[in-house]
Image (cartoon, rainbow, N blue to C red):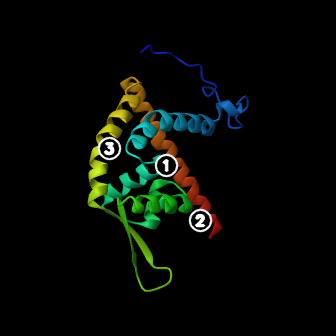
Amino acid sequence: MDKKTYETPWSHLNAQGDGLTVEDFITTLMSQVGNALRRTITVPYAEQHDLTVSEWRLLALIAHARRLAFSDLVIQSTSDKALVSRALKRLEAKGLVELQGEGNTPRKKIFCQVTEQGEALHAQVMPLARASQAAAIRVLPEEERDAMYSALMRLRAHCEQTEAATDNEED
């Protein structure tokens, strides 16, 4: 694949973001790329195994942890509670996860656990997922992969710090 260079409007960006258009916003680009990657990479192997992308993401998280509290699953999946709840109900109906309530209060804690069938499906899909993800990552030369990974980790840390500071202000 040819190594194409792209002109960036971010090089000499001032604090006010003068000159940025909506198409140049990092949130726009990340959303566009994330959606395109999901459609071209994740959807094919998820659908091949009769899963939605949400179901696959949750199954993978639960299989990795073996047992996970619903509240932790919501955080780790970066999805909202309603989406996680609906996807878990579908996974449970397919026999891939079990949901267990603990405690005697009306608001008992819910735990999600992968079943043997879920483990088997996870073991079948994960090599496809890894290979598909690796193919997309390997589109970038190694130095760009390293730079992108570092940049994404830095942006994630910035967002976490900003959210924590906002939460502290609200307390």
- The residue beneath circle 3 is 125
Which residue is pictured at 42% across the width and 26% down the height? Answer: 144
- The residue beneath circle 1 is 157
Separation of disc 1 and disc 2 at Cα?
16 Å
In this view, the residue in front, 95 or 105, is 95
The three-letter amino acid code for the residue at tag 3 is Val
The three-letter amino acid code for the residue at tag 2 is Asn
> Residue 6 at what x, y percent from top left?
56, 19
In this picture, is 81 found above or below 143? below
Separation of disc 1 and disc 3 at Cα?
30 Å
Q: Earlier in the sequence, mark 1 or mark 3?
A: 3
Position of residue 51 in the picture relative to residue 168 (left or right): left
Position of residue 137 in the picture relative to residue 23 (left or right): left
Helix, strand or loop status at disc 3: helix
Helix, strand or loop status at disc 1: helix
In the rendered image, which quarter contains the C terminus?
bottom right
> Residue 139 at what x, y percent from top left?
41, 24
Which residue is pictured at 45% across the width and 79% down the height? Answer: 108
Q: Nearer the viewer, mark 1 or mark 3?
A: 3
- The residue beneath circle 2 is 168
Mark 1 and mark 2 in contact? Answer it, CB < 8 Å.
no
